[in-house]
Structure formats: C-alpha cells, structure tokens
Image (spheres, helix red, strand yellow):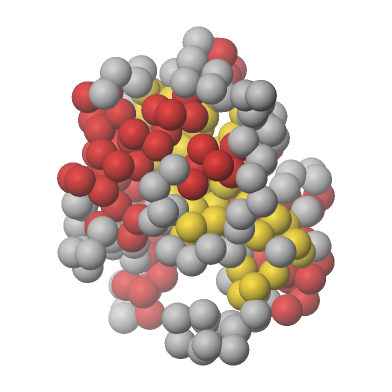
C-alpha cells in the first residue's frame, strides 16, 4: 500500500553550509541540484514546500561582529547572502521543472518578490516552492527564527531542520563516540539543556505555537521524502 505524506505543508530549514558540499566555502552546484531533486520528489507528493536558507557558506554576521564589525551591518550583509543562496536553489529547482518563487524580507524588486504572507500562501496552493530570503528582515534574528516565524505565518505542519547528522545528540557525535541520540525531545528540554537544535527564540516560538521540529540528516539522498512520509528518522522536538 502506497504511503501517504504525514504532512501537508512544511518549511525546510537549510543551513548555508548545506550548499557548499565539501568545498568549505561558496556553492557546490552538484549539491544544489541534489537538494533540488529531493524537493521535487516531495512536491510530487502534493506537499506544499517552503524553504529558508542560511548564509554560513558565504558570510557569518555574528562572527564578523565579534571581529569588530557593527552587528546590525554584519547581520544585513548576512541577509543579502541568503538572497544569493535562495537564487542558487531557485535556479536548480527551475532547471528540473519546479516552479519557484523567492520572497525576501528586504525589498530587492529586480531579483525577488517582497514577502507578502497571502501571496506566499497562494503560491503554495498553486504547487510552487516558496523560498524565504533575508531572514526576518531584522538584525539580531537568525534564519532559525525566520523559519519558525514563516512556518507559523503560513500554517505549516512542521519545520524540517536539515543537518549533517541524523538527529540531536547529547554532544557532538563527530567528536565523541559516546554521544547519545535523542529520538524525541520536549521544547523545554532543548532550552534547559541548551541543545543546539535551533536558537532559543526559534524554539520558544515553536513551543508557544505547538509547531513540531524534526532534525534529520540531509546528506543521505531521499531523507526529505522519508521524513515527509512519516519514517522514523532523526529527532522530533514537540
């Protein structure tokens, strides 16, 4: 019997580093194509997909501010970098026939639509993938918070937090072999234990609005589809 999707509308949260592959910086076109193909597979299930991408492969605002740059300026530069990543993913998606719209919280009319909630929802209803760029449009807020905010605004069922590991662990599983994986977590435990799932503002937003988060491994091809079909992979925060 064919599986039905466990979710009707999702927000996929990608880090900027997800696009760089093994390069260490910038964008790996093959990785972007792979992510685009996985998103296409999900769209074919009649699931509404919105995406929020970070900018760590190009510019880290927090790091720059620690090195002396004005924090607000650094954050705005980071927001612009998310527009670059969003356009890269848009190009990869449209090359394989997936209709896509980039909506940005900072007005850049020549490159993308300005974020309008009702328009975003209309695009999703028409089967288009919507990529939300520029975070919330405000400094001091991360793209994790932007993902939580946009997910709540558009009525998403879940945030899919794509990472390089297969869930949330007690400590870094790459460095520590005795790290233990959590199958399920409560929001409050994430906050109390200071687990690196998403930042505290994003977790609090999800907790207040009962929006679940699933943390999973993006590097294994097909995992986005598996999560959406309800397979028990990753860690669920709820």
> Could one spot residue 220 in this view of the protein?
yes
> Compared to 198, does 105 lie above or below?
above
> Compared to 166, does 118 lie above or below?
above
- 44 lies left or right of 16: right
Q: Quadrant of residue 174?
A: bottom left
Q: Quadrant of residue 22?
A: bottom left
Q: Residue at x 51, y 80 (%)?
A: 173
Image quarter (top left, top right, bottom left or bottom right) of the N terminus: top right
Q: x and y percent of residue 189 in the render?
A: 79, 71
Q: Residue at x 43, y 29 (%)?
A: 41
Q: x and y percent of residue 55 in the render?
A: 34, 55
- 148 lies left or right of 24: right
Q: x and y percent of residue 229 in the render?
A: 62, 36
Q: Residue at x 55, y 42 (%)?
A: 226
* Count of marks, rendered view: 0
Furthest toward the front, the residue is 1
- Nearest the eye: 205 or 178: 178
Q: x and y percent of residue 200 in the render?
A: 66, 65
- Nearest the eye: 58 or 228: 228
Q: Quadrant of residue 122?
A: top right
Furthest toward the top, the residue is 126
Q: Residue at x 23, y 30 (%)?
A: 91
> Could one spot residue 141 in this view of the protein?
no
């Amino acid at each position: 019997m064919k599986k039905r999707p466990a979710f009707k509308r999702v927000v996929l949260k990608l880090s900027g580093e997800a696009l760089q592959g093994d390069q260490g910086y910038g964008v790996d076109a093959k990785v972007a194509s792979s992510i685009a193909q996985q998103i296409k597979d999900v769209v074919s299930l009649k699931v509404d997909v919105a995406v929020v991408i970070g900018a760590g492969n190009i510019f880290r605002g927090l790091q720059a501010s620690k090195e002396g740059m004005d924090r607000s300026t650094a954050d705005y530069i980071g927001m612009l970098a998310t527009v670059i990543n969003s356009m890269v993913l848009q190009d990869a998606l449209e090359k394989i026939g997936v209709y896509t719209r980039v909506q940005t919280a900072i007005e850049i009319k020549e490159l993308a639509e300005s974020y309008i909630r009702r328009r975003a929802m209309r695009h999703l209803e028409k089967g288009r993938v919507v990529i939300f760029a520029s975070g919330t449009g405000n400094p001091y807020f991360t793209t994790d918070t932007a993902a939580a905010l946009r997910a709540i605004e558009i009525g998403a069922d879940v945030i899919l937090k794509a990472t390089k590991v297969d869930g949330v662990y007690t400590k870094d599983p790459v460095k520590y072999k005795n790290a233990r994986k959590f199958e399920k977590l409560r929001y409050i435990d994430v906050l109390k234990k200071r687990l690196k799932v998403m930042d505290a503002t994003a977790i609090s937003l999800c907790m207040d609005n009962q929006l679940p988060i699933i943390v999973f491994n993006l590097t294994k091809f097909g995992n986005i589809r598996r999560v959406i079909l309800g397979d028990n992979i990753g860690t669920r925060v709820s």
